[in-house]
Amino acid sequence: MIYAANFKTNHTRQSTREYLGKLQMKLLLDKNPNDEIYIFPPLTALDEYNSSDFTVGTQNAYPFESGAFTGEVGLEQLREFNIDTILIGHSERRDIIGESQEQVAKKFEFFKEQGFKIIYCIGESLEVREKGIEIVMEHLISQFEGIDTTYENFMVAYEPIWAIGTGRTASVEEITETHNRLKKVVDRPLLYGGSVKGANIAEISAIENVDGVLVGGASLKSETFLELVLH
Ligand code: PEP
């Protein structure tokens, strides 16, 4: 299984260090060697965290080496900390920050060229979900516009927007049907995201085409994230 923790705009440099220290201690003893673990702290908390038990990635970056892009972080800054993993297309960046599919695709292309591991997020609103699975799939497939789905170093995170941070998880049937259909479109590891927590990790991880989970709220404490990883 793949377990990815998205801190969003939570945690500081110091609390991230403490978190990763606790994570490392526990993983060293109890990690399943087949599991992959990714942590996405805020940009200010990036540092040289070398561990064979987890990978630290960035939640975002600007698709340039360096230059005049006030307030942005480019490849040069990520390289300082050996960061080569990135989240792209998260619904909060699409919907709150206003990233268009064109911008998302440009970012994907740039970091693909750099050989980054990419977790590429897609998802639908409740309004779309209520229109039925065919419309949901149309919407999800439109989020692959401009994305090279043959890139071998990326995975997809399916995150229904109505299930993110709401406590409302998609049902096993909804996840199963959506993941089965998505697997036919992109044959890459497929994560589910949306209110994953200790109480539902067993049933979600048991679904055939769920290769991992992307976790927000339940990843903020090392204890609750470890509960998922070591379930
Ligand atoms: C997310 O934002 O990627 C996410 C899945 O959040 P949560 O687990 O809090 O729903």
Image (spheres, rainbow, N blue to C red):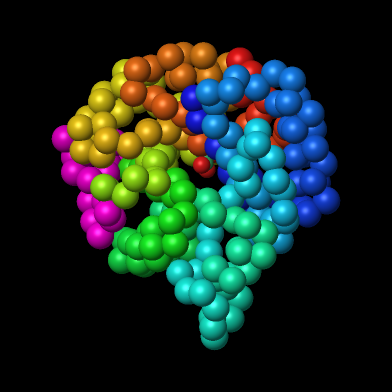
Q: Is residue 121 magenta?
A: no
Please report the residue visible at 82 percent of the width from the left and 41 percent of the height from the top.
Answer: 18
Image check: 166 left or right of 156?
right
Q: Is residue 136 magenta?
A: yes
Please report the residue visible at 21 percent of the width from the left and 38 percent of the height from the top.
Answer: 185
Q: What is the x, y in percent for residue 147?
A: 28, 55
Image check: 130 left or right of 41?
left
Q: Is residue 196 visible?
A: no
Q: What is the x, y in percent for residue 126?
A: 35, 39
Across the whole image, how many numbered discs are drawn on residues? 0
151 above or below 186?
below
Q: Nearer the viewer, residue 86 or 178?
A: 86
**Picture quadrant of residue 101:** bottom left
Q: Name the residue at the bottom extreme.
A: 68
137 above or below 44?
above
Which segment is the magenta one?
127-148
Please report the residue visible at 51 percent of the width from the left and 14 percent of the height from the top.
Answer: 202
Q: Nearer the viewer, residue 88 or 26?
A: 26
Please report the residue visible at 65 percent of the width from the left and 36 percent of the height from the top.
Answer: 52
Q: What is the x, y in percent for residue 158?
A: 38, 37
Q: Is residue 115 visible?
A: yes
Q: What is the x, y in percent for residue 127?
A: 30, 42
State which quarter of the image contains the C terminus.
top right
